[in-house]
Amino acid sequence: MSASLDLSAAPASRPRGRRMSPVVKLSAGFLILVVLVAILADWLAPIHYTTQNLLARLKPPLTQSGGTTYWLGTDQLGRDILSRMIYAVRTSILIAVMGTLIGAVFGTLLGFIAARMRGIIDQAIMMLVDAQAAIPALFLALTMLAFFGNNIVLFIILVSIDGWDRYTRLARGLVASEQESDYVNAVEALGASTPRVILRHLLPNIVAALVVQATLNFPGTILLETSLSFLGLGVQPPGTSLGLMLGEGRRYLLNAWWIAVFPGLVIFLTTLSMSLFGDWLRDRFDPTSERH
């Protein structure tokens, strides 16, 4: 009887921090919706995002003009806000994802090199990390764009600059701790090469922490992209992004608030959802977490 009582009590003792709260579920659902919108933009947009109708310029939401319903209104050139937002989500998410992946791969690689090589190489890499942490990413991006001009490849690289130093610090610390463990010493004693030790033994044991770090960095990457596009230094017309739409709409806040408010709302909800989901992942995979 006592054993059955113990078994029934076991699930209740499981940390609540490992379960998805309703807020986290809503955040995950919104992120899935954003990804689906980005993938299916060509099918979801009512009309092409560059189509202009000057006779329907600055129309408020839920307006009909010329047989077309503008669910979220139109901008200063008569372009459909809903269609532009759908394509803007695709552009912003693609840039943020690519920037996050490049920064994560580059930072993690440097962290592995620093932890494995030690000595002067480790010191040089950590000096580079400290220098990166001391320079605001927005200032560095503005400087690079001023010198080299603007193109999409350079823009993605500049967005990836934000946060790579965090991956380097994290990977260096985790690898330095793991490579002192018995299983690493055992496989090295058996003659395993350095690439095999890294790819088959070290990386699988720290990848969860790196994924969590990526989810926590992702909101900042989106905000950097939107900030640069807002300033006119990111995605250029006739392209569209959430930051570009926000920048274009700031001149019309008094008489056409919908141009800026709807993209700004999507930016806010996306970054908030990713932050909440990243916090849950951190609690889920952090073995030292004591949150209940």
Image (cartoon, helix red, strand yellow):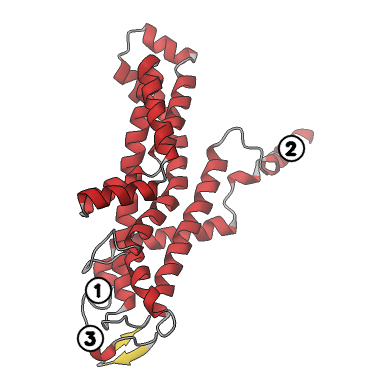
Left or right of residue 292: residue 24 = left
Rendered image: mark on residue 53: 3
Q: Amino acid at mark 2?
A: Ser
Q: Nearer the viewer, mark 2 or mark 1?
A: 1
The answer to whether mark 3 and mark 2 are in CB contact below 8 A is: no
Residue 12: x and y in percent read 70, 44
* Residue 160 horizontal/vertical position (percent): 33, 45
Q: Which mark is residue 49?
A: 1
Amino acid beneath label 1: Tyr
Can residue 117 be seen by looking at this rendering? no
What kind of element bears circle 3? loop
Secondary structure category for the residue under label 1 = loop
Q: Which part of the image, by quadrant, shows the C terminus?
A: top right
Give the mark, 3 or 2, whose residue is nearer the N terminus. 2
- Image height of 8 relative to 270, above or below: above
Q: Residue at x 33, y 84 (%)?
A: 70
